[in-house]
Structure formats: C-alpha cells, structure tokens
Image (spheres, rainbow, N blue to C red):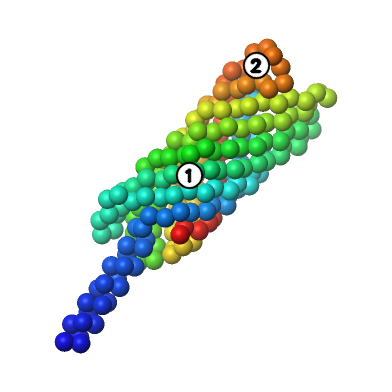
Amino acid sequence: MSSIAGDQLIGLTSRVKGKDMFSDGVYLHFGIGMPRLDYLGRGKIYQGLQPSFEFGSQFLFSKKNKVAIGANFSWVTIATSICDGEDIFGWDVNFGLIRFGPMLSVKLDENTAFDLFFNLSPTAKFNFFNYDDQGYVYLYYGALWVPGIKFRYNKFVAGVEVNFGTLFIDDLDRDEDPVHDRASYFNPRAFVGLKF
C-alpha cells in the first residue's frame, strides 16, 4: 500500500514540475542590442550598444506532454544608446509598447524548455542628433516584427531576438515635412532574465 502511495506521490510531483515549465507567468529581461537605422539616406548607421529592460507576461493555452502553444505579451520595453562618430553625435531613446504575438514552448525535461516567439511590436523612438554644428530631434514610430528564441532553466532565461521593419519619421524641431518620411530599422538583441 505504501509503495503504491509512494508511486502516486512521485507521479504527482513529476506532473507538478512539468506543469511549472508550462505555467503562465511574468518575466523580466535585461538585454543588449545593436540597432542600425537608415537615417536621412546615409545608409544604415550603427547607433551604439543599446542596454534594454523589458517586462512582460506569457500565457500557454494548449499544453501537451512536451509542447505548449500560447501567447507572449511584453507590456513595456525601454532601451537607450549613444552614437558618437566623427561627424555625428546621436542619443536614442526607444520605447516598445505592448508587444504581442504567438509562442511555442518545447520542454526538454522537468527543468528546461525552449520558447519560440514571433511578436508585433508597436514602437516609438526619440533620436537626438547633432551634426554640422546643428541639433535635430526626430520621432520614429510604427510597428516592428520581432522573431526570437529563448532558453529557460527553472526561472533563469537567456535568449536572442531581432527587431526589424520600417518606421515613420516626424521632425519635432521643424514645421516643414521631414526630408524622408520613413526609415529602415534593424536591431538584433541578446538578453538574460527571470521568469516567475
């Protein structure tokens, strides 16, 4: 009798541990990006290493033995970087606003899993540029595509993603129309964090 009870307890513990890797929860990511922006027709300009902070949630709807399907919601992402070149100085402040999309989680064992995600990221970027002894302030806004993958071990998270797409430009310093109305953006990012 005690052996049967022990086997049932081991089975229950195993299921609880397995469920933990597929549980809903919130996450914190601390990342480093390498953004490039096609600024005023000069080609893609590297904007410097970009530290970032992200707070989000994940929800898993369909859970099988080794695979779960769900959704990823990033409530806010804040990032900043400085580009200091020979003829141009730039400060970039980046806000990701309620990023969301589907995710697929694959469990390797009771403590590890991979998450694949593909997000749509509404984005606003403020760029403060100084070149030719003149200052400029631009707002870049639009929606970016963000595919990525992350590895989870218990609560620890490590991953990579790429932010890319086209952003609209608004010149905040001038009344006339901006020189270019759109810009191409590309930003690979690596991150570590915790999932609760």
Mark 2, residue position: 178
Q: Position of residue 7 (x, y in %)?
A: 22, 79
Q: Residue beneath label 1, please?
A: 74
* Image location of residue 68, percent across then percent down: 30, 52
Q: Is residue 121 above or below residue 27?
A: above
Q: Secondary structure at mark 2?
A: loop
Q: Secondary structure at mark 1?
A: strand
Which of marks 2 and 1 precedes in the sequence? 1
**In the picture shown, does residue 167 fall above or below 2?**
above
The amino acid sitting under disc 1 is Ser
Q: Quadrant of residue 132?
A: top right
Which quadrant does the C terminus fall into? bottom left
Q: Residue at x 55, y 43 (%)?
A: 77
Pick out the residue farthest to the top.
176
Question: Residue 184, can we see it?
Answer: no
Cα distance in 3D space between marks 1 and 2: 31 Å
Name the amino acid, label 2: Pro
Residue at x 44%, y 44% (from the top left corner): 73
Residue 39 in the figure: left or right of residue 70? right
